[in-house]
Image (cartoon, rainbow, N blue to C red):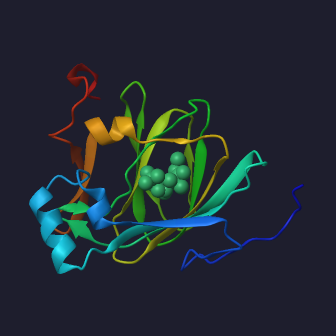
Amino acid sequence: MLFPEGVAIDGVTGSVQPATARYAKRLSELRGLFQDERAQERAIVDRDDPVVYEVIDYRKAESDLCFGTTIMSPGKVGAEYYMTRGHFHQRRDRGEAYYTQSGEGLLLLESRAGESRTVEMRPGVCAFIPPDWAHRSINTGSEKLVFVWFCATDAGHEYGEIRERGMRRLVVERDGRMVVTDNPKFLGDGSKLA
Ligand code: PA5
Ligand code: NI
């Protein structure tokens, strides 16, 4: 049986107490994600295989609802900012919300039909992710980006599609500014480029 409880979330460190699970993704586990593969290999060595992001869960299998935090380090690989893998949900009728606690970033979304959108991530903004939109978070700032996510427990993560074809847009730094550009390596149906 489940009982109510208060879960302490630190908006700066992203700690969740009590938590039920956590994982970290290091740069060496994200091969194929960034455009500049040589810059990534160099960064793995030079930066001692840094943690790009961590995810901490409060997830009870018997509940319909779960939440947790994602803590993203600042950094770049080539011109691209550190980002998450990005995914659709296995269940196409499940959305999500991302409530940014600290740092600054961009949430990049893509509908199944191929439409791209972005939502700014900054403290006080809760991003709505509709069902069946792929989503990827990008730390465009110089501090940690920490956000709380809320989702249906049965939503599931579907990584294969985005891993294989990429997303239509990239978020890069150009002349010291963040720019959203087309992904030249995108492997989807070109006619659907928005
Ligand atoms: O469920 C979510 O959307 C988040 O908890 C993400 O899983 C988290 O931000 C890590 O991103 P990804 O799962 O794309 O690696
Ligand atoms: Ni998600």
Q: Is residue 127 visible in the rendered structure shown here?
A: yes
- Is 37 above or below relative to 48? above
Q: Position of residue 139 (x, y in %)?
A: 37, 65
Q: Which residue does the image show at 37% across and 38% down from the upper left?
A: 160
Please report the residue visible at 14 percent of the width from the left and 57 percent of the height from the top: 37
Q: Nearer the viewer, residue 5 or 136?
A: 5
Quadrant showing the C terminus: top left
Q: Residue 67 versus residue 126: which sits nearer the camera?
A: 67
For the point 61% across and 65% down, the residue is 21
Residue 29 percent coordinates (x, y) = 31, 60
| Residue furthest top in the image | 191
> In the image shown, does 1 or 8 lie closer to the viewer?
1
Q: From the viewer's perspective, tell me whether residue 83 is left or right of residue 18.
A: left
Is the residue 19 above or below the residue 171 in the image?
Answer: below
Residue 23 placement, left or right of 161:
right
> Could you say where residue 142 lies in the image, as x and y percent from the top left?
33, 76
Q: Would residue 173 be found to the left or right of residue 105 on screen?
A: left
The residue located at (78%, 48%) in the rendering is 62
Quadrant location of the N terminus? Answer: bottom right
Q: Tell me the quarter of the picture where residue 110 sits.
A: top left
* For residue 133, above or below residue 82: above
Q: How many marks?
A: 0
Hey, which residue is sitting farthest left in the picture? 38
Q: Is residue 119 visible?
A: no
Front residue of 101 and 5:
5
